[in-house]
Amino acid sequence: MPEGDTVWLTTHRLHAALAGHSLVRADLRVPKLATVDLVGRRVLEVVPRGKHLMMRLEDGLTLHSHLQMDGSWHLYAPGERWRGGPSHQVRAILETAGRVAVGYRLPVLELLPTTGEGDVVGHLGPDLLGPDWDPARALERLAADPDRPVGEALLDQRNLAGIGNVYVAELCFLRGVTPWTPFGDIKAPEKLVTLAKRLLEANKTRPGHVTTGDTRRGRTNWVYGRERLPCLRCGTPIRSAQHGSADRSRVAYWCPRCQSGPGPGGG
């Protein structure tokens, strides 16, 4: 699932391309929107909220999308060949006089009143890359359940919005704990929240998630995706296992030497 910085970059590219321009084509390829006609409406702005994308249009409408695991938006010039995937995966085509935005594999695509955006994103915690960012409130939400594993707590968008599994793995490594460590056992938890903000800010204007400061292939992350490879800090082979709630399980990556605390299953 894309991280909050990926969604931030996607929305800002869509905003730069479409905002202020009227739609000359609007093809929404989901059953409930198949007959909706948005041609002629001007795009006012495209904004992120956590991992949600809000395209605000004239007449008080918002086109809401969520990328989840595989969704993506691509921008093209009119007449340019589309390269985001086969045509049957296209869920949205939004075209202005100068640009074409194509949404692929979008599991969530819905049209709602702009005044009703809170119905779909009102449950989210403070947005790490949003104007509502409040580290004290995020920390308060995380600390409300001190027995909850830190990896699971960070993935819960109700606590703070924008962190995905890549950053969970990297944040835990950088703070020297495993994803199964109870949040209440984290020393100086405010540093964890501050670090999360710093990492997303550092990566929001570029593709990928560089947490090591090294952009060379295979060295961008400390532990994420590096199962059995040597830890970049100590050389110990990186391990992996499932973590998170039963209905939202993810793969955890950690260094058994650099990170202390419980392992899989809390043991």
Image: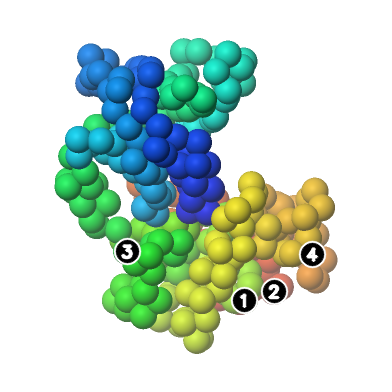
Horizontal relation, residue 180 to residue 134: left or right: right
Please report contact status of discs 2 and 3: CB closer than 8 Å, yes or no: no
Which residue does the numbered mark 2 point to in the structure image? 258
**Dot in front, 2 or 3:** 3
Location of mark 4 (residue):
232
Amino acid type, mark 1? Gly
- Determine contact: label 1, label 3, CB under 8 Å: no
Q: Picture coordinates of residue 99 (x, y %)?
A: 51, 26
Tell me the quarter of the picture where residue 23 sits. Answer: top left
Amino acid type shown at disc 3: Gly
Res 157 quadrant in image: bottom left
The reply to whether callout 1 and callout 4 are in contact (CB within 8 Å) is no
Please state the horizontal and vertical placement of residue 190, each as a whole percent of the image: 46, 82
Give whichever of discs 4 and 3 has the lower sequence position. Answer: 3
Labels 4 and 2: the sequence-earlier one: 4
Q: How far apart are labels 4 and 2 at the CA level?
A: 10 Å
Spot occupied by residue 30 in the image (x, y as percentages of width and height): 31, 20
Real-space CA distance between mark 4 and mark 3, rounded to the nearest whole angstrom: 33 Å
Residues at marks 1 and 3, CA–CA distance in whole angstroms: 25 Å
In the rendered image, which residue does mark 3 sit on?
Answer: 125
Are the two marked residues, 2 and 1, in contact with CB atoms closer than 8 angstroms? yes
Gap between marks 2 and 1, in whole Å? Answer: 6 Å
In the rendered structure, which amino acid carries the disc numbered 2? Answer: Cys
Q: Residues within 10 Å of mark 2 (few under 14, many from 20)?
A: some
Residue under the point 25% across and 35% down: 58
Of callouts 2 and 3, the N-terminal one: 3
